[in-house]
Amino acid sequence: MEFVKAMRKATNIKVLAILMIALIFSMYQETPAQRKKPAAKKPAPVETKPIVSSTDISYTVSMTKPWTHLLEVEMRYKAQNMPAMVELKMPVWTPGSYLIREYARHVEDFTAKDANGKGLMWQKINKNTWQVDTKGAKEIVARYNVYANELTVRTNELNDQHAFFNNSALLMFPKDGLNQPSTVRVVPYGNWKVATGLPKVENQTNTFRAENFDILYDSPFEVGNFVETTFVFRGVPHRLIFEGEGNYDVQKTAKDIEKIVAQGVEIFGDIPYKDYLFIVNLRGGGGLEHLNSTALQWNKFAFKPEASYKSFLNLVAHEYFHLWNVKRIRPDALGPFDYENENYTKLLWVAEGGTAYYEGVLLRRAGLNTDKEVLSSKTALIQALQNRPGRTETSLENASFDAWIKYYRPDENAVNNQISYYDKGELVNFLLDIEIRAASKGAKSMDDVMRYLYSEFSKKNRNFTPEDFQRTTEIMAGKSLNDFFSKYVRGTEEIDYNRILNGMGLRINLESDAKKQAFLGGNLAQDGEKLMIRALGSDVPAYQFGLNTGDQIVAIDGNRASQTFLTNYLNEKKPGDKLKLTVFRFDTLRDIEVTLGGRGKQDYAIVPVENPSEEQKRLYQDYLKAPLK
Ligand SMILES: [Zn+2]
């Protein structure tokens, strides 16, 4: 669109000026690489040298035939004492997305040579390891292609429009070499531009340096003709790029994001990066957090209406807040990373749930949403949790721990045996914040918990454990919260919402219809001519009388079944009436008789208590920046 192109021109001049400023500031700011904690397991020296190109590991990423979706990688690896056999490995997952993704399956055309171009023998010794016989060479040159045709925030895409790639899904690491620095040179297709959070190597085109592989794998690249702008907050440049056309307003979005950045920095008091990059691709949805960048996806025409734009800002706030919560304030197992196995932690309810909680907090403080919007988002979480049988099966800690096999691999039974550590995590962080504020009479809040974790763990190069987290909240509350944690974090007890909400002068209002409607239950979907059962909670009549997920309902009391028919028919029935459902289960027709249950409307709302005290009013005002009413 035209306005987009004009914007691109106007912003380029600004970008130049800002880069000059950035250069000056970069002399005084630590890079994320320098800030990166040396690992307990794998210590790395603090890096204070200027960016230089000389590294023993260097990659060149080319894209000469974008239509093939093949990213071409050349990896040069030098070693003084090169082992007789070198093992080059592809990560099997990428941090922030807790699923084994087997990136090695996209590797093609692997070859290995010495520096003189003489071929070296190699073999695969497991799913993600290429073992090269170095024959005494001091340098090996491995070349391979990676098929890149999946645009998500944790995969790669190359086509005639652009390239987006995650280094963890593209670049091999040498065994035992995760602490080594490396450089990446990108050879863009045509006149495409390159964006990444990695620092540039001086005097070299499109060449970037990473101090170790946790930094390298933390830094996605966007290569294309993206639209861009930069804003400077407290001297630190923040670059915002949109890949493709859409109904976004670059300048307005940059202004709103700056307000979010300001609120994040306000909490922690410093800016722990020397520049930050927001990458927005305009398909799909979701985001992935990094130390000084984030990859976001949003539908190209979903920047309007206002509600949809606010959802986008929520996503931005989420990924941005992660630069502290999870990228620097790190749960026990989350960094330095093991790229070949699952990394288990019970703390995703803090890393993800806590970050989801701070989305609304940052937007509220930035004036981008209202107090009522914050509360209604929590109401929706309460409603969803209370309608989910899985809440009595899985605790927050267990849901976190099993993310690898459950949250990222939901099946039709998930509603019965799982909860989301995002959703219940957000809710429990919200309630914990109220507990702390009420117990400390407003002196402390979850902000203090975050600041404490930042200063006592992140800045002291320590990861935190579940015990550390509980202890920190107890320091702020000034009392034991063991009951809260054992019931709602480690356990699966029903949450006593009203006791906690009362601290801020709030309560749950449950609007129930006394008149119960006939109720079958289940998640049904009309798929063309077919009425299908997609999922069944264990607490609904359809489940209890023997229907299965995957059943196709063909007839209801002898009438052709459809979603519309069923809805209308149930309106004519009352609780206790019987229905004969004729269903195809696999390839066999059968009849199932169901006795209908009764269900009234159950609408939750968070409302003020009657006659709130002055203290309740003060705590509400302090938290939600609006009077309690
Ligand atoms: Zn997240």
Image (cartoon, grey):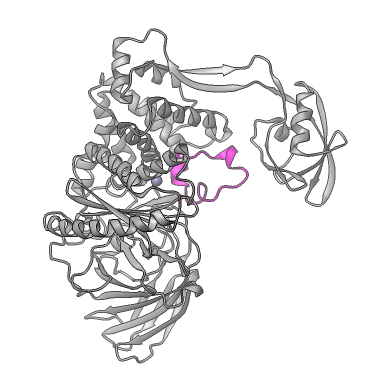
Reply above or below: 254 against 36: above
Query: Could you say which is closer to the camera, residue 294 or residue 56?
Result: 294
Q: Quadrant of the C terminus?
A: top left
Query: Could you say which is closer to the camera, residue 326 or residue 314?
Result: 314
Q: Residue at x 20, y 54 (%)?
A: 274
Q: Quadrant of residue 180?
A: bottom left
Chain part drawn in magenta: 399-422
Reply above or below: 313 against 516: below
Residue 97 covered by magenta stretch: no
Reply above or below: 604 against 471: above
Q: Quadrant of the N terminus?
A: bottom left
Image coordinates of residue 513 in percent, x first then y, are 63, 16
Residue 421 covered by magenta stretch: yes
Q: Quadrant of residue 343?
A: bottom left
Does residue 44 appear in this view? yes
Magenta stretch: dominant secondary structure:
loop
Q: Quadrant of residue 607?
A: top left
Does residue 595 appear in this view? no
Q: Residue at x 68, y 15 (%)?
A: 515
State the count of labels.
Answer: 0
Q: In this rendering, would 555 be left or right of 163? A: right
Q: In this rendering, would 154 be left or right of 595? A: left
Image coordinates of residue 241 in percent, x first then y, are 35, 56
Image coordinates of residue 111 in percent, x first then y, are 42, 83
